Each structure stands twice: as structure tokens, then as C-alpha cells.
Image (cartoon, rainbow, N blue to C red):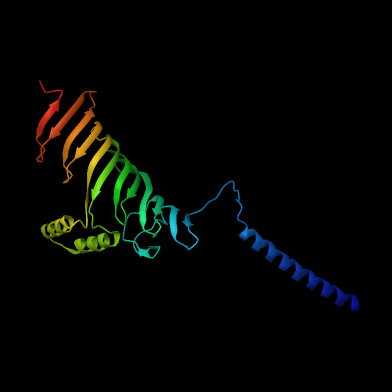
Amino acid sequence: MMNTKRELIFLRTFAVSITALIGVLTTVAFKNKGNTQFDTIDVKRINIIENDGTVKMLITNAANFPSKGDKINGRVYHERKKRAGMLFYNEEGIECGGFIYDGKKTEKGHSSGLSLTFDQYDGDQVMQLITTDAKRDGKRYKAGRLVFNDRGDNETQEKTQKISEELRAIKDPAERRAKFKEYQQKGMIGGVPRVALGQTPGKQNGLFLYDSNGKTRAKFIIDEDNKIKLEAYDEKGNTVSTWPEDK
């Protein structure tokens, strides 16, 4: 009987000691600031955060891409297409750019694209590296370019979201366009390309310049026939000068 009691006491003491040791080892392991190496990690989303919890970057699959109703750093997202990629955030937790991509077969061919963007402060993209590749009915359209955009001085992400919701609620197209133009003139919404360097779907490779309304005003290109062209246009799109001069 005494031996049995001693064995029980020993087993209890041993169990408590092992539990305490595991707890200590686990705590030390998680507090270890050294690097941990892995051969393979399968993960659906990674949030890179600061010490105060502010998300500075996230890497995500398509299903966990922030969209309507999701909240990051206290800001609620509007509806947008979910894509795999990365999103960047500034010191105030405001989204300031990202990298997204997609690609799939369609009934008539395929559709794919890649976009790396950088936003103006609390606004939308002012610089974008983008490629597109679409095939429809046996014909393929490919393009890739580096684009610099102008955006409104009074634009903010929250204002843009509210204005977009307001515009979607307007049923009359003419009224919607007038309201959009009103906000655009106030510098609260909208953006236009000003400079693009790359290739168009029409296989023109070169430099393209746009005015403040987003209309092409000049381009210096090599076309699909390997001919060099320098052309300038007026605000209505009419050619005003060319080089070499047309014969």
C-alpha cells in the first residue's frame, strides 16, 4: 500500500514537472527573436505588422484579398475584385500601393494581367506598371507599359468610396456623368494618364504623352512595320505635325 502511494506521488510530481517544463520551453521558443528556418510554408494570408499592430503589408491568396466590408487598420473596404497578390500600407495604416495578378482561360480564349501600383497619399495610383494579355476568337492582344497618372489634389480614399456609392445610385446616365464631372472639377475623384512608356495592343512601341484631359497629344513610336514615327495632335485628335513628314 505504501509503495502504491509513493508511486502515485512520484507520477503526479513527474507529470507536474513535465507540464511546467513544456510551458517554459514553449514560452522561451515564442519569445526567441532569432530567425526560424522552414523549407516550405503553406499559408493563405500573411499580415506584416508593426509593434503597435498596424498592418504594413499583406501577402494573400485571392479568397482572402480585402474587399467589401473587410477592415484593415480601422478602414472598411469597398467592393472590388479579389486577386492574389500584395498590398502596402503607410505609417498611418492607409493603403498606398500593391501588386496583383490573374489569368485564366475563357470561352473565347484567355485573359490575364499583372499590375504593380503606387498611390498618392490617401489616394489612388499615380504610377503603374501593367501588362495585359487577352485572346478572343483566335486573335491575341498583348500590351505592357509604365504609366504616370494625374489625380485630384482633394482626393481621399474614403471620399472616393462615398462618391462612387453615390454615383452608382444615380440611374440616369446623363445625370451620373454630370455629377462625376462636378466632383472631377473639384479634384475629388478621377484620374488621367499623362505619360506612358511601352507597347499598345496595336503593337506600337514607344513614348506616349497625354494632356490634362487624358487625350493623346504626342507619341514617338516604332510601329509593327518597324517604321519610326513622331506625331503631335491637337485637342480634337487631329494630326498637326509628323516626323518623318508624310510624302
Foreground pick, 23 / 102: 23
Q: Nearer the viewer, residue 112 or 118?
A: 118
Would residue 167 appear left or right of 19 to someone viewing this image? left
x, y percent for residue 123: 29, 55
Across and down, in percent, residue 190 comes to: 22, 53
Residue 40 lies, in percent from the top left, at 57, 47
Q: 62 or 207, which is in the foreground?
A: 207
The percent coordinates of residue 141 (x first, y second) are 27, 36
User: Residue drawn 64% across and 59% down?
Assistant: 29
x 30%, y 49%: residue: 125
Relative height, residue 155 to residue 38 (above, below):
below
Give the left or right position of residue 146, taking residue 5 as reference: left
Residue 130 visible in the snapshot:
yes
Q: Quadrant of the C terminus?
A: top left
Q: Quadrant of residue 107?
A: top left
Whether residue 137 appears in this view of the structure is no
Q: Residue at x 53, y 51 (%)?
A: 42
State the residue at coordinates (28%, 59%). Answer: 156
Would you place residue 146 above or below residue 229 in this image? below
Q: Residue furthest top?
A: 247
Q: Residue furthest bottom?
A: 1
| Quadrant of the rendered image containing residue 112 | top left
